[in-house]
Image: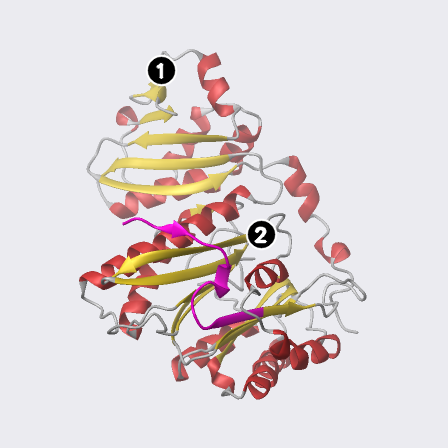
Amino acid sequence: MSFKKVKGGVCAPQGFRGGAVSCGIKEVGNPRDDLALIYSDHPCVSAGTFTTNRVKAAPVKVTQAHLRAMDLRAVIANSGNANACTGVPGITDARQMAKTVASSLGIRQREVGVCSTGVIGLPLPMQRMEEGLHTLPTKLTRDGGRQVAEAIMTSDTTVKEIAITATVGGKKIRIGACAKGAGMICPSMATMLCFVTTDASISKACLQKSLLEAVEGSFNRICIDGDMSTNDTVLVLANGQAGGKPITRRSKACREFSEALQHVLLELAKACVRDGERVSKFVTLNVQGASLYLDAKKVAEAIAKSALVKSSWNGGDPNWGRIIHAIGYSRARIREELIDIAYNGKAACEGGLMAKTPLKTLRDIASRDQFTITVDLHLGKADYTIYTSDLSPEYIDFNRSEYAYWKNAGID
Protein backbone atom coordinates (compact mmCIF):
# COMPACT_ATOMS: atom_id res chain seq x y z
CA MET A 1 0.00 0.00 0.00
CA SER A 2 1.01 3.60 -0.53
CA PHE A 3 0.41 6.30 2.04
CA LYS A 4 0.45 10.06 1.62
CA LYS A 5 1.35 12.26 4.57
CA VAL A 6 -0.95 15.19 5.30
CA LYS A 7 -1.00 17.90 7.94
CA GLY A 8 -3.18 18.05 11.02
CA GLY A 9 -2.12 15.21 13.32
CA VAL A 10 -5.06 13.86 15.32
CA CYS A 11 -7.35 16.49 13.81
CA ALA A 12 -6.62 15.51 10.19
CA PRO A 13 -9.48 12.97 9.88
CA GLN A 14 -12.95 14.41 9.27
CA GLY A 15 -15.00 15.32 12.32
CA PHE A 16 -12.24 15.56 14.93
CA ARG A 17 -11.25 18.62 16.94
CA GLY A 18 -8.56 19.21 19.52
CA GLY A 19 -7.19 21.79 21.89
CA ALA A 20 -5.00 22.41 24.92
CA VAL A 21 -4.62 24.81 27.83
CA SER A 22 -2.10 25.54 30.56
CA CYS A 23 -2.99 24.65 34.15
CA GLY A 24 0.44 24.91 35.77
CA ILE A 25 0.44 21.19 36.57
CA LYS A 26 4.23 20.98 36.56
CA GLU A 27 4.85 24.40 37.99
CA VAL A 28 2.61 27.24 39.13
CA GLY A 29 2.70 30.00 36.55
CA ASN A 30 4.31 27.87 33.85
CA PRO A 31 2.58 28.97 30.62
CA ARG A 32 3.21 25.73 28.73
CA ASP A 33 0.07 23.79 27.77
CA ASP A 34 -0.31 20.66 29.91
CA LEU A 35 -3.97 19.65 29.51
CA ALA A 36 -5.22 18.41 26.13
CA LEU A 37 -8.54 17.26 24.71
CA ILE A 38 -9.47 15.31 21.56
CA TYR A 39 -13.14 15.14 20.56
CA SER A 40 -15.20 13.69 17.74
CA ASP A 41 -18.27 15.57 16.61
CA HIS A 42 -19.81 12.19 15.83
CA PRO A 43 -20.16 8.91 17.77
CA CYS A 44 -17.18 6.57 17.45
CA VAL A 45 -16.12 2.99 17.78
CA SER A 46 -12.97 2.75 19.85
CA ALA A 47 -10.23 0.41 20.99
CA GLY A 48 -7.28 0.54 23.35
CA THR A 49 -4.22 -1.23 24.65
CA PHE A 50 -2.62 -0.58 28.02
CA THR A 51 0.47 -1.28 30.08
CA THR A 52 0.82 -4.80 31.45
CA ASN A 53 2.65 -3.42 34.47
CA ARG A 54 0.81 -4.75 37.53
CA VAL A 55 1.04 -1.29 39.04
CA LYS A 56 -1.40 0.67 36.92
CA ALA A 57 -2.13 4.38 37.14
CA ALA A 58 -5.62 5.58 38.07
CA PRO A 59 -6.41 6.89 34.54
CA VAL A 60 -5.51 3.49 33.05
CA LYS A 61 -7.98 1.76 35.37
CA VAL A 62 -10.70 4.31 34.69
CA THR A 63 -10.25 4.25 30.90
CA GLN A 64 -10.22 0.45 30.81
CA ALA A 65 -13.53 0.47 32.68
CA HIS A 66 -14.99 3.06 30.30
CA LEU A 67 -13.96 1.02 27.26
CA ARG A 68 -15.58 -2.09 28.69
CA ALA A 69 -18.82 -0.16 29.16
CA MET A 70 -19.06 1.69 25.86
CA ASP A 71 -17.13 3.39 23.05
CA LEU A 72 -15.09 6.54 23.64
CA ARG A 73 -15.78 9.80 21.86
CA ALA A 74 -13.26 12.04 23.63
CA VAL A 75 -9.87 11.78 25.34
CA ILE A 76 -8.66 14.14 28.08
CA ALA A 77 -4.96 13.96 28.92
CA ASN A 78 -2.60 15.83 31.21
CA SER A 79 1.19 15.94 31.40
CA GLY A 80 3.42 16.61 34.40
CA ASN A 81 1.69 14.23 36.81
CA ALA A 82 1.02 10.52 36.21
CA ASN A 83 -1.74 10.18 38.82
CA ALA A 84 -0.18 6.80 39.60
CA CYS A 85 0.07 5.20 43.05
CA THR A 86 -2.42 7.77 44.34
CA GLY A 87 -5.00 5.35 45.74
CA VAL A 88 -8.73 5.97 45.83
CA PRO A 89 -8.32 9.77 45.55
CA GLY A 90 -6.48 9.22 42.27
CA ILE A 91 -9.41 7.22 40.87
CA THR A 92 -11.77 9.96 42.05
CA ASP A 93 -9.67 12.63 40.32
CA ALA A 94 -9.52 10.66 37.05
CA ARG A 95 -13.27 10.18 37.10
CA GLN A 96 -13.76 13.87 37.84
CA MET A 97 -11.66 14.79 34.80
CA ALA A 98 -13.94 12.66 32.62
CA LYS A 99 -17.11 13.92 34.30
CA THR A 100 -16.27 17.60 33.92
CA VAL A 101 -15.33 17.26 30.25
CA ALA A 102 -18.34 15.06 29.47
CA SER A 103 -20.70 17.59 31.04
CA SER A 104 -19.28 20.43 28.94
CA LEU A 105 -19.45 18.36 25.74
CA GLY A 106 -22.91 16.97 26.40
CA ILE A 107 -21.81 13.33 26.29
CA ARG A 108 -21.70 10.51 28.83
CA GLN A 109 -18.87 10.30 31.33
CA ARG A 110 -17.96 6.81 30.10
CA GLU A 111 -17.47 8.18 26.58
CA VAL A 112 -14.35 9.99 27.80
CA GLY A 113 -10.94 8.33 28.02
CA VAL A 114 -8.56 9.72 30.63
CA CYS A 115 -4.76 9.68 30.39
CA SER A 116 -1.98 11.15 32.50
CA THR A 117 1.80 11.20 32.23
CA GLY A 118 4.54 12.55 34.47
CA VAL A 119 5.86 11.99 37.97
CA ILE A 120 4.54 8.98 39.90
CA GLY A 121 3.17 9.14 43.45
CA LEU A 122 1.95 12.73 43.70
CA PRO A 123 -1.74 13.74 43.70
CA LEU A 124 -3.09 15.70 40.77
CA PRO A 125 -3.32 19.46 41.46
CA MET A 126 -7.06 19.44 40.78
CA GLN A 127 -7.53 23.00 42.05
CA ARG A 128 -5.19 24.26 39.36
CA MET A 129 -6.79 22.01 36.74
CA GLU A 130 -10.44 22.80 37.48
CA GLU A 131 -10.73 25.93 35.32
CA GLY A 132 -8.92 24.27 32.42
CA LEU A 133 -11.22 21.25 32.52
CA HIS A 134 -14.25 23.55 32.28
CA THR A 135 -12.91 25.85 29.55
CA LEU A 136 -10.99 23.41 27.35
CA PRO A 137 -14.08 22.06 25.52
CA THR A 138 -14.82 25.62 24.32
CA LYS A 139 -11.34 25.90 22.77
CA LEU A 140 -11.56 22.87 20.47
CA THR A 141 -10.64 23.57 16.83
CA ARG A 142 -10.00 21.61 13.63
CA ASP A 143 -6.44 22.94 13.78
CA GLY A 144 -5.78 21.77 17.33
CA GLY A 145 -3.75 18.65 16.54
CA ARG A 146 -0.39 20.31 17.09
CA GLN A 147 -1.53 21.77 20.41
CA VAL A 148 -2.55 18.34 21.63
CA ALA A 149 0.79 16.79 20.60
CA GLU A 150 2.74 19.53 22.37
CA ALA A 151 0.65 19.50 25.54
CA ILE A 152 1.24 15.80 26.30
CA MET A 153 5.05 16.12 26.17
CA THR A 154 7.09 15.68 29.35
CA SER A 155 10.81 14.97 28.85
CA ASP A 156 10.24 14.83 25.07
CA THR A 157 12.27 17.31 23.04
CA THR A 158 10.37 16.90 19.75
CA VAL A 159 6.68 16.82 18.86
CA LYS A 160 5.58 13.39 17.64
CA GLU A 161 2.60 13.49 15.28
CA ILE A 162 1.63 12.11 11.90
CA ALA A 163 -1.37 11.97 9.58
CA ILE A 164 -1.83 10.02 6.36
CA THR A 165 -4.38 9.29 3.69
CA ALA A 166 -4.86 5.74 2.44
CA THR A 167 -7.27 3.85 0.23
CA VAL A 168 -8.96 1.11 2.24
CA GLY A 169 -11.69 -1.02 0.72
CA GLY A 170 -11.79 1.34 -2.23
CA LYS A 171 -12.53 4.30 0.06
CA LYS A 172 -10.13 7.14 0.83
CA ILE A 173 -9.64 7.50 4.58
CA ARG A 174 -7.44 9.46 6.94
CA ILE A 175 -5.57 8.34 10.03
CA GLY A 176 -4.07 10.90 12.40
CA ALA A 177 -2.03 10.31 15.53
CA CYS A 178 0.26 11.80 18.14
CA ALA A 179 2.44 10.25 20.82
CA LYS A 180 4.72 11.12 23.68
CA GLY A 181 7.53 9.11 25.17
CA ALA A 182 11.25 9.55 25.76
CA GLY A 183 11.94 7.69 29.00
CA MET A 184 10.49 4.65 30.79
CA ILE A 185 10.24 3.10 27.34
CA CYS A 186 9.98 -0.65 27.06
CA PRO A 187 6.26 -1.11 26.49
CA SER A 188 4.46 -4.40 26.76
CA MET A 189 0.73 -3.96 26.15
CA ALA A 190 0.59 -1.97 24.70
CA THR A 191 6.16 7.33 30.33
CA MET A 192 4.23 6.41 26.69
CA LEU A 193 0.92 7.65 25.36
CA CYS A 194 -0.47 7.48 21.83
CA PHE A 195 -3.78 8.79 20.51
CA VAL A 196 -5.09 7.79 17.08
CA THR A 197 -8.09 9.11 15.17
CA THR A 198 -9.58 7.96 11.89
CA ASP A 199 -12.63 8.75 9.79
CA ALA A 200 -12.80 5.16 8.52
CA SER A 201 -16.09 3.33 8.87
CA ILE A 202 -14.96 0.22 10.71
CA SER A 203 -16.34 -2.46 12.99
CA LYS A 204 -15.16 -2.64 16.59
CA ALA A 205 -13.84 -6.17 16.04
CA CYS A 206 -11.67 -5.08 13.12
CA LEU A 207 -10.49 -1.96 14.95
CA GLN A 208 -9.40 -3.88 18.06
CA LYS A 209 -7.71 -6.59 15.98
CA SER A 210 -5.89 -4.00 13.87
CA LEU A 211 -4.74 -2.10 16.94
CA LEU A 212 -3.36 -5.19 18.66
CA GLU A 213 -1.44 -6.18 15.53
CA ALA A 214 -0.16 -2.65 14.92
CA VAL A 215 1.00 -2.20 18.52
CA GLU A 216 2.77 -5.56 18.47
CA GLY A 217 4.67 -4.47 15.36
CA SER A 218 5.52 -0.99 16.64
CA PHE A 219 5.36 0.11 20.28
CA ASN A 220 6.08 -3.40 21.53
CA ARG A 221 9.24 -3.36 19.39
CA ILE A 222 11.00 -0.40 21.03
CA CYS A 223 13.27 -0.12 24.03
CA ILE A 224 15.12 2.92 25.39
CA ASP A 225 15.89 2.17 29.02
CA GLY A 226 14.20 -1.18 29.70
CA ASP A 227 11.56 0.30 32.02
CA MET A 228 7.82 -0.22 31.56
CA SER A 229 5.60 2.65 32.63
CA THR A 230 2.52 2.49 34.83
CA ASN A 231 0.63 4.65 32.32
CA ASP A 232 1.30 3.26 28.82
CA THR A 233 -1.84 3.68 26.73
CA VAL A 234 -2.78 3.60 23.06
CA LEU A 235 -6.31 4.68 22.13
CA VAL A 236 -7.98 4.69 18.71
CA LEU A 237 -11.24 6.50 17.87
CA ALA A 238 -13.01 5.90 14.54
CA ASN A 239 -16.04 8.04 13.63
CA GLY A 240 -16.93 6.65 10.17
CA GLN A 241 -17.13 10.04 8.45
CA ALA A 242 -15.26 8.80 5.39
CA GLY A 243 -18.43 6.87 4.57
CA GLY A 244 -18.97 3.47 3.02
CA LYS A 245 -19.84 0.14 4.57
CA PRO A 246 -18.15 -0.70 7.88
CA ILE A 247 -14.88 -2.57 7.44
CA THR A 248 -15.38 -6.06 8.85
CA ARG A 249 -12.81 -8.17 10.67
CA ARG A 250 -11.95 -10.88 8.16
CA SER A 251 -12.11 -8.72 5.05
CA LYS A 252 -9.38 -7.54 2.71
CA ALA A 253 -10.23 -3.99 3.77
CA CYS A 254 -9.49 -4.88 7.40
CA ARG A 255 -6.03 -6.11 6.39
CA GLU A 256 -5.48 -2.88 4.46
CA PHE A 257 -6.55 -0.77 7.43
CA SER A 258 -4.28 -2.77 9.74
CA GLU A 259 -1.34 -2.15 7.43
CA ALA A 260 -2.04 1.59 7.36
CA LEU A 261 -2.41 1.74 11.13
CA GLN A 262 0.85 -0.14 11.67
CA HIS A 263 2.64 2.29 9.36
CA VAL A 264 1.41 5.21 11.48
CA LEU A 265 2.29 3.61 14.83
CA LEU A 266 5.72 2.43 13.68
CA GLU A 267 6.61 5.95 12.58
CA LEU A 268 5.68 7.26 16.03
CA ALA A 269 7.42 4.39 17.83
CA LYS A 270 10.67 5.08 16.01
CA ALA A 271 10.29 8.78 16.80
CA CYS A 272 10.09 7.90 20.50
CA VAL A 273 13.41 6.02 20.30
CA ARG A 274 15.12 8.79 18.38
CA ASP A 275 13.96 11.26 21.04
CA GLY A 276 14.96 9.01 23.94
CA GLU A 277 16.22 10.76 27.02
CA ARG A 278 19.76 11.89 26.18
CA VAL A 279 20.32 9.11 23.61
CA SER A 280 22.77 9.53 20.73
CA LYS A 281 22.20 6.29 18.78
CA PHE A 282 19.24 4.76 16.97
CA VAL A 283 19.87 1.04 16.59
CA THR A 284 17.83 -1.41 14.54
CA LEU A 285 18.37 -4.89 15.95
CA ASN A 286 17.45 -7.83 13.72
CA VAL A 287 17.52 -11.34 15.15
CA GLN A 288 17.08 -14.12 12.61
CA GLY A 289 17.55 -17.85 12.32
CA ALA A 290 15.86 -18.70 15.62
CA SER A 291 14.07 -22.01 16.04
CA LEU A 292 11.03 -20.26 17.58
CA TYR A 293 9.53 -16.77 17.40
CA LEU A 294 9.73 -16.47 21.19
CA ASP A 295 13.43 -17.34 21.10
CA ALA A 296 14.09 -14.58 18.57
CA LYS A 297 12.17 -12.16 20.78
CA LYS A 298 14.05 -13.21 23.93
CA VAL A 299 17.40 -12.68 22.24
CA ALA A 300 16.43 -9.27 20.83
CA GLU A 301 15.07 -8.02 24.15
CA ALA A 302 18.07 -9.27 26.13
CA ILE A 303 20.43 -7.33 23.87
CA ALA A 304 18.24 -4.22 23.71
CA LYS A 305 17.93 -4.03 27.51
CA SER A 306 21.58 -4.73 28.36
CA ALA A 307 23.18 -1.74 30.07
CA LEU A 308 26.61 -3.01 29.05
CA VAL A 309 25.67 -3.31 25.38
CA LYS A 310 23.96 0.08 25.34
CA SER A 311 26.92 1.72 27.08
CA SER A 312 29.33 0.35 24.46
CA TRP A 313 27.11 1.76 21.71
CA ASN A 314 27.29 5.15 23.40
CA GLY A 315 31.07 4.97 23.20
CA GLY A 316 31.09 3.89 19.57
CA ASP A 317 32.52 0.54 20.64
CA PRO A 318 31.45 -2.44 18.46
CA ASN A 319 31.79 -4.81 21.42
CA TRP A 320 30.21 -7.99 20.06
CA GLY A 321 31.35 -9.86 23.16
CA ARG A 322 28.75 -8.02 25.21
CA ILE A 323 26.11 -8.86 22.62
CA ILE A 324 26.87 -12.58 22.60
CA HIS A 325 26.92 -12.72 26.40
CA ALA A 326 23.43 -11.17 26.43
CA ILE A 327 22.34 -13.79 23.91
CA GLY A 328 23.67 -16.44 26.26
CA TYR A 329 21.54 -15.39 29.24
CA SER A 330 18.41 -14.67 27.18
CA ARG A 331 17.03 -18.17 27.97
CA ALA A 332 16.53 -18.76 24.27
CA ARG A 333 17.67 -21.94 22.59
CA ILE A 334 21.10 -21.21 21.04
CA ARG A 335 24.34 -22.88 19.99
CA GLU A 336 27.31 -20.65 20.64
CA GLU A 337 29.32 -22.05 17.74
CA LEU A 338 26.61 -21.08 15.22
CA ILE A 339 26.08 -17.43 16.18
CA ASP A 340 26.93 -14.67 13.69
CA ILE A 341 26.83 -10.95 14.58
CA ALA A 342 27.18 -8.12 12.06
CA TYR A 343 27.21 -4.30 12.11
CA ASN A 344 25.60 -2.89 8.96
CA GLY A 345 26.33 -6.19 7.25
CA LYS A 346 30.00 -6.24 8.30
CA ALA A 347 30.81 -9.39 10.28
CA ALA A 348 31.94 -8.83 13.87
CA CYS A 349 31.43 -12.43 14.98
CA GLU A 350 31.25 -15.60 12.90
CA GLY A 351 30.47 -18.97 14.41
CA GLY A 352 30.82 -17.56 17.91
CA LEU A 353 34.36 -16.30 17.20
CA MET A 354 35.88 -12.97 16.21
CA ALA A 355 35.46 -12.25 12.51
CA LYS A 356 38.22 -10.94 10.24
CA THR A 357 36.59 -7.54 9.62
CA PRO A 358 39.08 -4.79 10.60
CA LEU A 359 38.20 -3.26 13.96
CA LYS A 360 38.41 0.22 12.46
CA THR A 361 35.63 -0.66 10.00
CA LEU A 362 33.36 -1.77 12.83
CA ARG A 363 34.24 1.27 14.95
CA ASP A 364 33.39 3.59 12.08
CA ILE A 365 29.93 2.00 11.91
CA ALA A 366 29.36 2.03 15.69
CA SER A 367 30.34 5.71 15.87
CA ARG A 368 27.44 6.70 13.60
CA ASP A 369 24.17 7.96 15.04
CA GLN A 370 22.24 5.17 13.29
CA PHE A 371 23.19 1.60 12.41
CA THR A 372 21.79 -1.94 12.17
CA ILE A 373 22.94 -5.02 14.07
CA THR A 374 22.03 -8.45 12.73
CA VAL A 375 22.22 -11.58 14.85
CA ASP A 376 21.85 -14.93 13.07
CA LEU A 377 21.37 -17.95 15.31
CA HIS A 378 21.32 -20.44 12.40
CA LEU A 379 18.77 -22.68 14.09
CA GLY A 380 15.56 -22.02 12.16
CA LYS A 381 13.49 -19.45 10.29
CA ALA A 382 12.00 -17.32 13.08
CA ASP A 383 13.00 -13.65 13.32
CA TYR A 384 12.31 -10.55 15.40
CA THR A 385 13.19 -6.86 15.03
CA ILE A 386 13.45 -4.31 17.80
CA TYR A 387 14.36 -0.60 17.71
CA THR A 388 16.55 0.59 20.53
CA SER A 389 19.16 3.13 21.63
CA ASP A 390 22.35 3.64 23.57
CA LEU A 391 22.63 4.58 27.26
CA SER A 392 24.52 7.75 28.10
CA PRO A 393 26.01 9.36 31.22
CA GLU A 394 23.63 12.24 30.55
CA TYR A 395 20.66 9.86 30.87
CA ILE A 396 21.70 9.07 34.44
CA ASP A 397 22.24 12.73 35.27
CA PHE A 398 18.84 13.63 33.82
CA ASN A 399 16.98 10.95 35.78
CA ARG A 400 18.64 11.04 39.18
CA SER A 401 16.57 13.88 40.65
CA GLU A 402 13.01 13.59 39.32
CA TYR A 403 11.31 14.76 42.51
CA ALA A 404 13.55 17.80 42.71
CA TYR A 405 12.87 18.60 39.05
CA TRP A 406 9.10 18.22 39.48
CA LYS A 407 9.06 19.95 42.88
CA ASN A 408 5.89 21.83 42.03
CA ALA A 409 3.97 18.88 40.63
CA GLY A 410 2.27 18.07 43.92
CA ILE A 411 -0.55 19.54 45.96
CA ASP A 412 -1.40 23.22 45.73
**Residues in magenta, as a range:** 1-18
Image coordinates of residue 31 in percent, x first then y, are: 76, 63
Q: Which residue is mark 2?
A: 159
Image coordinates of residue 8 in percent, x first then y, are: 51, 59
Circle 2 — which element? loop
Above or below — where is 336 with respect to 119? above
| Of residues 158 and 277, the one drawn nearer to the viewer in this rendering | 158
Do we see residue 61 in this rendering?
yes
Question: Marks 1 and 2: in contact by CB < 8 Å?
Answer: no
370 left or right of 331 in image: right
Image coordinates of residue 145 in percent, x first then y, are: 55, 62
| Of residues 181 and 166, the one drawn nearer to the viewer in this rendering | 166
112 falls in the magenta region: no
Q: Which mark is residue 21?
A: none
2 falls in the magenta region: yes
Quadrant, the C terminus: bottom right
196 left or right of 280 in image: left
Above or below — where is 207 with respect to 274? below
| Callout in the foreground (2, 1) | 2
- At label 1, the amino acid type is Ala
Within 10 angstroms of label 1, few (less than 14), some, or many (20 or more) residues?
Answer: some
Image coordinates of residue 172 in percent, x first then y, are: 31, 62
- At label 2, the amino acid type is Val
Within 10 angstroms of label 2, few (less than 14), some, or many (20 or more) residues?
Answer: many
Above or below — where is 262 with respect to 335? below
Picture residue at 48% right of the left edge, 84% below the top: 110
Of marks 2 and 1, which one's residue comes earlier in the chain?
Answer: 2
Circle 1 — which element? loop
Q: Which residue is mark 1?
A: 355
Q: Mark 2 and mark 1: span between their CA atoms?
A: 41 Å
